Amino acid sequence: MLGRTASSLFWMSRYMERAENMARLLEVGHRISLMPGAIEGHRDEWRSTLMSAACAEGYDSKHEEISAEQVVDYLVFDESNPSSIKSAVRTARNNCRAVRTALTRDVWETINATWNELVAVKPTDLSADRLPEFLEWVKHRSMSFRGAVLGTMLRNENYYFSQLGNFIERADNTARILDVKYFILLPKPSDVGSEVDVQQWAQILRSVSAHRAYRWFYHDSRYRPWLVAEFLILREQMPRSLVFSYQWINTALEGLANIHGKRYKCHDMVGQSLAKLRAGKMDDIFQSGLHEYITDFVASNRALSASIAQTYHFP
Amino acid sequence: MTKFFNEMGESADASRPAYAQVSAWLKTIAPNDVERAKTEAENIFRRQGITFAVYGDGESSERLIPFDIIPRVFSGHEWRKLSAGLEQRVRALNAFLYDIYHRQEIIRAGRIPAEVIVQNAAFVPDMVGVNPARGIYAHITGVDLVRVSENDFYVLEDNCRTPSGVSYMLEGREAMMRLFPKLFSEQRVAPVDGYPAMLRKTLESVAPPACKGEPTIVVLTPGIFNSAFFEHAFLADEMGVELCEGGDLFVSDGYLYMRTTQEPKRVDVIYRRIDDAYLDPLSFRADSTIGIPGLIDLYRAGRVTIVNAPGTGIADDKSIYTYLPDVIEFYTGEKPLLKNVPTWRCSDASSLSYVLEHLHELVVKEVHGSGGYGMLVGPTSSKAEIENFRAKLKTRPSNYIAQPTLALSAVPTYVDAGIAPRHVDLRPFVLSGDQVRITRGGLTRVALKEGSLVVNSSQGGGTKDTWVLED
């Protein structure tokens, strides 16, 4: 397989995952803007949405101040923002087009149809009352893409490279959300936070579609910050947790090692990260610093991505 | 407008034999079914992304080429005649290319003036003395033909560089078979789906001398933003070979390799869909970012085959075109089976004055133009357009050739007002390698505007499925 083909498969999945995560972050941002107390706090909330999406710097270079319309426009439509939903779907589709011969027809048609429908949506169509419906649609299209990948692709190189992109992006996304919000998850003298804190914890869970799963999993009607952190980092039952993502990355890299009959540095890297996540204890993580833990993770995830690109000759 | 030849027949009741079934079918098909079929055909094309890019058009830059559901039909007898003429012409073109890059016998014999060849921008001096595998230069040729009567076909141009359109031939047939299976069961239409296999065989047969064993073939594309990208991906997929961009290939230790996820893999044959000028920044345009540095040196050393060969463009240059009847006779010793359109070279003073006097009845083209741009169709142009063109012609006469306006044949076509005849041309695809292979069929392009003779997709043309009936 061409290195460029592997790279395109990786980035195709990575950008579809990014579009879906962006939709989730926007859902949460939109939801908060409707909450009581949003009036004075809403600018901070949109700022934290921009930060979670790693788009704050880009936004600031274009806009003087924060307004809901401008943030939504920047994160959905702005093509100068490489992570906007539109840019992400465009990049995913361009990569998909470049490697059509490596994909099933279902995968191609899902992405192609998504793009064709997306270009028909105008910023003026997304008034506040229509935004949630649109974001729902974006999530569904991404899930439909993922369904096509899982349901129709042979478990060969093509499949494994697309899985790598998908889960490197997912791990990065979850880690970034934790990174931006880590301070509200830090243990406080009192067990139960204020009403504002509880809202914040709920939002973190919502931004990874896990607020209900949390209740089912912990049988607890209260959100407890260390459990929220644990859920997103260490729980392999949670499909957007760091450990879950790394299990998939590990499986994909093992799959490639089987096909190629060769292991590389990236195999060791993922093995070490996974072992660390599996052995992790929340107490220890808080002891040595949640912020440091997450910062290290984001850096090692980035290093893994770079190592995969180098190993398999991405252009 | 003069009278034109209607390929279905002069009246609905007297269809020509080849069109008997199609004509009967058209009488039974309901308008609703036509609409449904058109929509369905469009959906088939759009879902698969069979689009072409229109440059500088922003968001909607990927368009569908309109597909007409009424096929264009040739009898087996008609096709055999055409096919023989195509084979003769393409063999002569390859012999001509070999000659002008070697001993130039045709110049010595005084059949073509030396300056027409050596001063031609399409002549590539780097190719002099190079021996491509089997002496073949134009492996894939798309010969554009027009018909003016029952027995008269003319060659408009020989596309010897990187002719496109074959994917439309193949996908158009797929769509027709899906939409109207009954039509295909009522008569025997020669299949076209063997084209990718024939192309692969052709490419394998011209592996370079340095290749031992089964050759590795790749398709080289400029990338996803090229207007014919779909076709590049389609052909690579159908042949089961990698679709490469320039950056995927590199020269090392005297061989060509592609970058894979593992060790580099040797490449023997490149079916390139990029122009000569961009192939190798070390030999041609230094600013090319889509080529492969060092490729031409390898090619000259017989380590890799480039398809079509660099420098083939001279064979389809419009200034050479006028000599083609002589060229065919010179190399084959036979009279040409397919006619050239009579052509005035405006570089010639007496021809120029004739052309200037008869602009209203002539078609004037740029010598190096393509895609239907920069041309004048006298009979359908306004006085102002003609005068405008006259000025250009006077400034640079040698940049133009002129031809009589041919009464292109027409085939019934679905248009907004119902069924009406529209003018067509034909591009069959001729493959040259260990033997000449011609698919029975081709790309029929149709000018959808009433009276229009311009069939190019960039100018509002559409396509039709092209049938050759088995006897």
Image (cartoon, coloured by chain):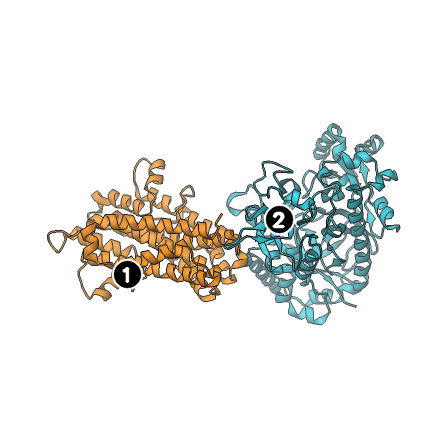
Chain colours: A orange, B cyan
Q: Are marks 1 and 2 in contact (CB under 8 Å)?
A: no
Q: Residues within 10 Å of mark 1 (few under 14, many from 20)?
A: some
Q: Is residue A74 visible?
A: yes
Q: Is residue A184 above or below residue B360?
A: below
Q: Quadrant of the N terminus of chain B?
A: top right
Task: List the single residue furthest toward the front.
Answer: B253
Tell me which residue sits at (84%, 45%) in the image: B327
Residue for badge 2: B255
Q: Secondary structure at mark 1?
A: helix
Q: Position of residue B9 (x, y in %)?
A: 78, 59
Report the side of A140 relative to B453 (left or right): left
Residue for badge 1: A278
Q: Amino acid at mark 2?
A: Tyr
Q: Position of residue A14 (x, y in %)?
A: 41, 53
Q: Amino acid at mark 1?
A: Arg
Closer to us: B80 or B451: B80
Tell me which residue sits at (21%, 52%) in the image: A200
Tell me which residue sits at (85%, 31%) in the image: B350
Q: Position of residue A305 (x, y in %)?
A: 39, 51
Q: Residues within 10 Å of mark 2 (few under 14, many from 20)?
A: many
Instruction: State the mark number for residue A40.
Output: none
**Chain under callout 2:** B
Task: List the single residue furthest toward the top.
Answer: B395
Q: Is residue A93 visible?
A: no
Report the side of A193 relative to B412 (left or right): left
**Chain under callout 1:** A
* CA–CA distance in space, label 1 to label 2: 48 Å
